[in-house]
Image (cartoon, rainbow, N blue to C red):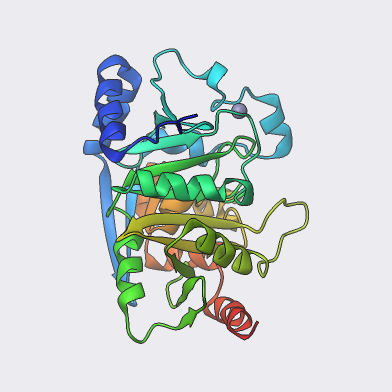
Amino acid sequence: MEEKHKVTSAEASALLRQQLGVWPLVAQNFKALEAVHLKQFEWNGLTVKVQFNPARIVSSGAKVDAKSIKARKCFLCPNHLPEEQLRLPFGERYQVLCNPFPIFPEHFTIPSLAHTPQLIVPQLDDFLEVVRSLDRFTLFYNGPRCGASAPDHAHFQAVTWGLMPLDEEVMAKEQELSALRYVSAEGTVILLHHYLRNGFILKAKTKEAMRSLFLRIYALLPVPEGEAEPMMNLFGWYREEEWILALIPRKRHRPWQYEAEGADHLLSSPGAADIGGLFITPLAEDFEKINPALLQDVYEQVCWSDQEVMELFLRLSND
Ligand SMILES: [Zn+2]
């Protein structure tokens, strides 16, 4: 049997143009994005952009505990999608949809057709396949407690390349001569540190090699009690016939300020965009008060320290 079609970057862009013509809510949300307020901070060699995006309250404020998830209708299941939502089948198991609450001028959600939990290992081959096919975009994965608003339904997101500072910073880092590298038969792991969202850049030429490289790091990451997998955000690109992944381990879903009342309150549930350096604030008062010290505080709470990633890197190199 012939292999099912994989959606290309051009086909995804065409889907969005078509979708904007037939779904007023989505047309309105993408239009609003053009006028969105943006602030940019640079400190200690880091760049972080902050986007004021009121429509994202749906996602940042989403209740993702097991009980609330069970009680709601899954919005990624094919039977529950709004009638206006166009779908492009991707291979046998996925479809490409336009994200109705965008952060990026081109923003797609790629859910599995089956209602199956958000987990990276069973989806890794598919992730790599989508990365290669949608090569003009950045593909990302939010772990079930790392920004995914549907932890019960497997999905990825594909977004405009270059808006998250991480897009260019990862490419620059992997060229840096002084970067710490671990080279194995499967590929290369480059340490990403002094970055507030520390982690690992992985490079490999085949899916099999990338899988085995990924699994070696995965096996060293702690799994928090009650969780099904180590906490992480994963980014992927395909350049010059090579896969490049950025694996950013997490230690917390939300900063303590999420639960705080009054002046300390911050409505932030960091997912891949925030970790990528495009920090989303759905509330005007949060957008006003955000500054480098607060951003640094949030990243330090939810991501790994320089020492933590270094220790894991040394274990990997000494294995
Ligand atoms: Zn579902």
Q: Residue furthest left?
A: 35
Q: Can you give x and y, in whole percent of width and height, for residue 129 in the image?
A: 45, 46
Residue 146 relative to residue 206: left or right:
right
Q: How many marks?
A: 0
> Residue lying farthest top?
83
Q: Is residue 229 left or right of residue 54?
A: right
Residue 105 seen: no
Q: Residue at x 69, y 40 (%)?
A: 65
Does residue 76 lie above or below 308 as drawn? Answer: above
Percent from the top left, x then y, of residue 228?
A: 72, 51
Q: Position of residue 10 (x, y in %)?
A: 25, 36
- Pick whichever, 76 or 304, lies toward us: 76
In the rendered view, tell whether residue 44 sits above or below residue 35: below
Q: Is residue 263 left or right of residue 230?
A: left
Q: Is residue 198 left or right of residue 281?
A: right
Image-quarter location of ligand 1: top right
Looking at the image, which residue is at 73% across and 52% down? 227
Q: Residue visible at 54% across and 21% down?
A: 78
Q: Is residue 93 above or below residue 222?
A: above
Q: Quadrant of the C terminus?
A: bottom right
Of residue 151 and residue 220, the one placed in the foreground of this image is: 220
